[in-house]
Amino acid sequence: MDFTLTENQRAIRDLARRFAQEIEAREEELEGREDLLQEAFARMGERKLTGMIVPEAYGGAGKDQVSHVLCLMEAAKASPAVGAVAAANHAFYCFPILAWGSHEQKNTYLRPCVTGVNIGCCAFAEDEGDTEPSRVHAKATENSLGWLLNGRKRFVVQGHIASYAVFVAQADGERGGPGLSSLVVRLEGKQGFRKGKVEESLDILASRSAEMIFENVQIPHDALLGRAGEGMDHLKCIQQESWMGIAALAVGIGRAVQEKSLAWVRKRQVSKKSVASDQGVQWRLADMATELDAAELLTLRPAWLKDHGKPYEKEAAMARIFASDAAMRASSQGAEIMGGVGGESSLEKHMRSAKMCQVSMGSSGPAAALVAWNLTKTG
């Protein structure tokens, strides 16, 4: 079994690392500054790091999924905020359009968010916060002009800064059908659309979510993504893609804590003796390194499987569970190693970001249930 990265993958990782070093110096400024966060995302797009797996014909880099995961790890290591925006923009918006969109839809709706000019999101959850078809009340009604959208969406990840959205609703009309359907919407300047309450969370700006209100929002006929009634299938695929992204973010966050912990113990002395020479500290650092290495390999596995056209849902769920827990444990170990010094080491921010990886897209429960189902199913 060969774990060696290809020359192209190493080049992408190194490019992402250089970009990460640029934004790391300004990471503190990104806290609560939407304009700076979008600026950093745009700079990421200029380097073709925001549309890694999207073909060059649509403004992307035309690379593989492993390269995309490596890029997210490097970005999150320097800035969990920028990494989270890149991961969500891909999983919730670019991925479904790339997977089910027509050539015309990709040209029109994919390119702006692939290039970093705009940010996309997916509006699926409502008041109950889940995606059960019976609890999705939003409607897409077909008329002579296209589709008329009505509904109130909540917990839309990065909805407060998004310019485009995949809107999940019950389709009604000649092309409607049972179940949910997905439609793509350009939000800017759209009559009848407005953004509502922005939900605060443990993490910084990137993981905030927003309410979106659609009142008789008219969109064209060609806005339907795939076929009517496929919405639940779309959401399942979006979920597993997001799990892979969350795992990559978690690895990057854990690596940042690991580096900060190592730098701390190397410069810190107690009774003229380096803290790095303490065996208890060494064991903690060894456990941290071991878990993060395992998390990285688990995260690269579903990416490799996807690149080779193989199912990767179970592996993405495993990576999401293990990597987010490993990042949280690394943060906790880092706090103990550094004696709880949070401000100077940015440890508090990384702990909050690691916790958000554990609870994003719900808790680890759905991912664990899927893994268990795959292990216990027969036939």
Image (spheres, helix red, strand yellow):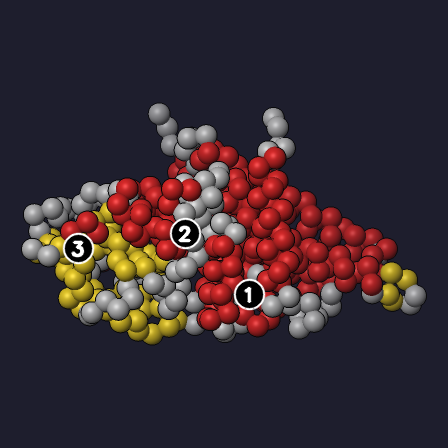
Q: Position of residue 208 (x, y in %)?
A: 43, 67
Going from N to C along the chain, the mark reached first, 1 or 3, is 3
Q: Badge 3 is on which residue?
A: 220
Label 3, secondary structure: give it: loop
Q: Nearer the viewer, residue 174 or 114?
A: 114
Which residue is drawn at the image coordinates 60% and 45% (left, top)?
13
Q: Nearer the viewer, residue 84 or 200?
A: 84
Between the residue at mark 1 and the residue at mark 3, the CA separation in whole angstroms equals 41 Å
Q: Position of residue 299 (x, y in %)?
A: 53, 42
State if disc 2 and disc 1 touch (CB < 8 Å): no
Q: As rendered, which of 16 and 65 lies closer to the eye?
A: 16
Q: Which badge, 2 or 3, comes first in the chain's sequence?
A: 2
The amino acid type, in three-letter code, at marker 1 is: Arg
Q: Looking at numbered disc 2 in the image, what kind of residue is underneath it?
A: Val
Label 1: state its secondary structure. helix
Q: Is residue 37 above or below residue 236?
A: below
Q: Which residue is mark 1?
A: 352
Kindly state the secondary structure of the residue where label 2 is placed: helix
Rendered-image quadrant of the N terminus? top right
- What residue is rendered at 29% in x and 55% in y? 166
Query: In the rendered image, which residue does mark 2 sit on?
Result: 114
Task: State the CA–CA distance, disc 2 to disc 3.
Answer: 22 Å
Q: Dot 3, crowdedness within 10 Å: few (<14), some or many (≥20)?
A: some
Looking at the image, is mark 1 or mark 3 nearer the viewer?
3
